[in-house]
Image (cartoon, rainbow, N blue to C red):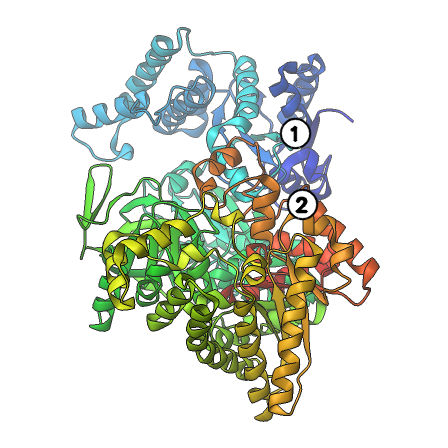
Amino acid sequence: MGHVFLFAKGKAEGDRTMVEILGSKGANLAEMTNLGVPVPPGFTISSRLCLSYLNGGGLPTELDGELRQAMVALEHATGRVFGGTPHPLLVSVRSGAAVSMPGMMDTILNLGLNDETVEALALESANRRFALDSYRRFIQMYANVVFGLRATGNGKRDPFAHAMESLKSARGVERDVDLGEDDLAELVQTFKAIVEREHGAPFPDDPWQQITGAIEAVFRSWTSRRAIDYRRVHRIRDDLGTAVNIVSMVYGNMGEDSGTGVAFTRDPATGERRVFGEFLINAQGEDVVAGTRTPLPLDEMTDRLPSAYQEFLRICTLLEEHYRDMQDVEFTVERGRLYVLQTRRGKRTAASAVRVAVEMVREGLIDENTALQRVDPDQLNQLLHPTVDPDQELDVLTSGLPASPGAAVGRVVFHANRAEELARDGERVILVRHETSPDDFHGMVAAQAIVTSRGGMTSHAAVVARGMGKCCVVGARQLDVDEDAGRFRVGDTVVHEGDWITVDGSSGRVIRGKVGLVALDPGEDFTILMAWADRRRRLRVRANADTPADAARAREFGAEGIGLCRTEHMFFEGHRIDAMREMILAETEEGRRRALDKLLPMQRDDFLGIFRVMDGLPVTIRLLDPPLHEFLPRGADELASLAHEMGVDADRLRHTVDALTEANPMLGHRGCRLGITFPEITEMQARAIFEAACDASADGVEVHVEIMVPLVAVHDELDRQAAVVRAMAREVFRERGLEVEYLVGTMIEVPRAALTAGRIAETAEFFSFGTNDLTQTTFGLSRDDSGRFLPHYVETGLLSDDPFQTLDQDGVGQLVELAVRSGRATNPALKIGICGEHGGDPRSVAFCHRAGLNYVSCSPFRVPIARLAAAQAAISHPL
């Protein structure tokens, strides 16, 4: 197989199955040619040459002969001569990766023009202005792409654009089209002079020299910063390379009977079944993309170019039925004749994706499995949260990590009490902090959104916000927050308390001022699609929920139980945290039990509410997990206030708090270690759980309770905590005169637990992987501090993904698979799930399916995402 593949006169040396070789664009050009679609003749150079070239191999010697042979075929197909007169063949040189990367790599138009061929083009077209305009465009584009003479981010201006603006100013005109022939001839000479001055060599007149330079430049564009960034964001492999498409030029700027445009076979915003697009009369494609002229609605082609319009509609129908998907089609009309330059899968909003998928099933174009695969699970966030109106101009202050999706508008506040106070008065507020702590919980509840300058995707702010379904951006490192002064700064911009900002938790943007938000209704098609997903998935989907309100929201989104109820979150509000602090600071068991007696009815009432909401579904309750210092005040004023409330000496209280402070609290006195040291804590929580379960059962509620012991590393830890729980169960059941079924299991979140899972499974009736901590302890990373350097690791390719967002299958994944195998070898009936942040990440969900887990658990708003991802995993990897 050679390096060059021809498509011309209704026949192509390739088709859409050769996308790895021809790239998406080349494969589709070949496919359309075979379909009889009017595609300008051309050929594609294999993407296999790209990586070889970039690795220092240069262009192979045999390529020159293949190129010349293909160009002869192109000359025969067009009746033109490359580099010759009187009918010069001009070509475009475009990139084309296997996965479409629109606008990320380079293109050159009008290649083949020089001082001789431009005169031939002027005679042939009877339009000298058109020919000269094409020539100056070519010089500018070629110099930009091949020689790198373009604007840069460090303030360097595009010298060609500057020359154009200077000439327009001298002539007193505002638009390019108002420049005459003499002006364009002058620009051509000016542009050539710029090339020789900036590049150090004359602009190449030889078309074969031009084409070699263009091919190499397109290959190099694979490693441009924007292309690399695009691949990182869209998770496209770096080892694909790009093909090069060389296509004979057709012109939409040859007069009023010519034009160019872009259209979708369905509305990309709504999914409505109608051809939707825009076009320009007497323009080239770059004019549409650049936005230098305002395009016309496609419907107006009916009056301007009626014959081409009708043919275009026919071709759109043909392409959609052939590809069985919505298409994005680029076209040019040259003197009334239609040419299709490209078709590709159309980008679309979530609402459009869902509607198109469901309607194409109804139309018989695709089956339900294909429809489910057509919708990106992460896109569903657009349907479940308000979003920033895309039609507005935005003053983006900075960006951070998109910790919890949605968008919100509010006045800036810097303290939780202030947030609560203003919200009580009806104000919409956004809480901005360096970072949040449990002390800020009431302010987080009151706020429309939370922004922090520190922290990662599993920081306190991120986890709490996601659980509440509240918009949140964390790790916005450019924010210089001065909480005491009531302001934050981004560069030279200062935002004071009370100023309005908008937070986009889906993209991580912090925007100055009020911005309109758009709330979407998922609609009937969404319900239908999710029903298809539920019939196919094997994985169950639960939710992480800590309150009855969270549980109710989870059921609305289709959760099949609660996979993680974090009991510590119940202690953050109002007077509850006072009782919790009293318990922590007590110096005797008797004092701790007095405080725990105050907490018992609060916990029991919360559990009762959750059991009622989750009637018939399992509820996994994790015993107290975080280090105790998280519940204690930190500032001098807060300590003094607590000392006054407790009636103790402030210095003595400060000494006690200092004594509880740990150097590395996430690896310190927390999780099951608290229950072993202070078994009365476990006793209180177990009593609250079983009393609530009995009360709910007595009311006719079907209760399925699962009690989870956190941070087990040694099997005896689970044995001892399980003994406390089961003893309390017997005591409560005897007191209430009834029993409820329950399970005792553990959270696998440290490597040792995964490695000894077989022994732990002798006691555990279920495993739930806490992948936040398992990732942290496996990598040796602090999840709260890693946000300072992990983005750099991902950007530079040291890590393919942030392991706190997408499960590290090579490392953490091996521990999960090992624990599953050894745990089930001991107990074949062992129920296994995952309750870390990865439970709502589509690729992590796919791993959980392959690993044989029973369920995933995630925040309520991510439940539909996990349901769809689980269905896609079942379709792709049937077990």
Residue 104 seen in render: no
Q: Nearer the viewer, residue 558 or 24?
A: 558
Name which residue type carries label 2: Gln
Q: Secondary structure at mark 2?
A: loop
Q: Secondary structure at mark 1?
A: loop
Question: For the residue carrying disc 1, how many other residues have a C-alpha within 10 Å: few (<14), some (14-19), or many (20+)?
Answer: many
Name which residue type carries label 1: Ser
Indicate the position of residue 550 as horizontal and vertical percent values. Answer: 47, 72
Which comes sooner in the sequence, label 2 or label 1? 1
Picture layout, residue 719 above or below residue 206: below
Picture layout, residue 15 above or below residue 75: below
Describe residue 178's horizontal placement relative to residue 559 as left or right.
left
- Name the residue rendered at 63%, 51% in the picture: 843
Question: For the residue carrying disc 2, how many other residues have a C-alpha within 10 Å: few (<14), some (14-19), or many (20+)?
Answer: some
Q: Nearer the viewer, residue 332 or 753?
A: 753
User: Which numbered disc covers residue 809?
Assistant: 2
Task: Identify the image quadrant of residue 199.
Answer: top left
- Name the residue rendered at 40%, 50% in the picture: 659
Describe residue 515's horizontal placement relative to residue 533 as left or right.
left
User: Which numbered disc covers residue 323?
Assistant: none
Picture layout, residue 368 above or below residue 196: below
Task: Identify the image quadrant of residue 574.
Answer: bottom left
User: Which numbered disc covers residue 47?
Assistant: 1
